[in-house]
Amino acid sequence: MTFWIGFALYSAVMAFVWGFFLVARMHVFKFREYSVHVEPATRFLALFLLVLTAVGYVAIYNLDSPKKTETVAEQATKEEY
């Protein structure tokens, strides 16, 4: 259950961030004559956002994955009386 909540919240946040990026990308097409650095910086930002998005989804998946449980035999060998 918590996986889907985290997934939904992260998706909403990333949709908001990607929306701002797309608006900025549209402005790049309008103002690309002003500087030669605008397009490479926008490409770098797109790559960074893509990596950030993927890492976030992997982190959400790993946080919700079940933890390794010990078997009865493993627990019995570790107990000290």
Image: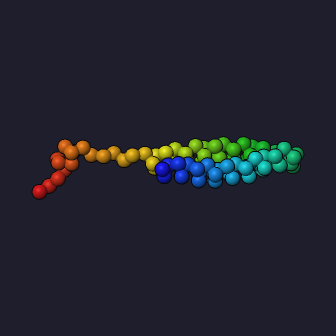
- Count of picture labels: 0
**Residue 56 point in image, percent of width and height:** 55, 48
Image location (x, y in percent) of residue 43: 72, 42
Q: Given the current orientation, which residue lies at the most extreme bottom position?
A: 81
In the rendered view, how is the structure colored?
rainbow
Q: Residue sitting at 36 percent across and 47 percent down?
A: 67
Residue at image point 17% right, 53% down: 79
Answer with left or right where residue 14 lies relative to residue 56: right
Relative placement, left or right, of 48 versus 2 is right
Report if residue 45 is visible in the image. yes
Task: Residue at 17% x, 47% y: name it.
Answer: 77
Residue at point 52% right, 44% down?
58
Q: Residue furthest left?
A: 81
Residue 59 at least partly seen: no
Query: Which quarter of the image is occupied by the C terminus?
Result: bottom left
Q: Position of residue 45 (x, y in %)?
A: 69, 47
Is 29 left or right of 67, judged from the image as shown?
Answer: right
Nearer to me, 69 or 30: 69
Residue 24: x percent and y percent? 78, 50
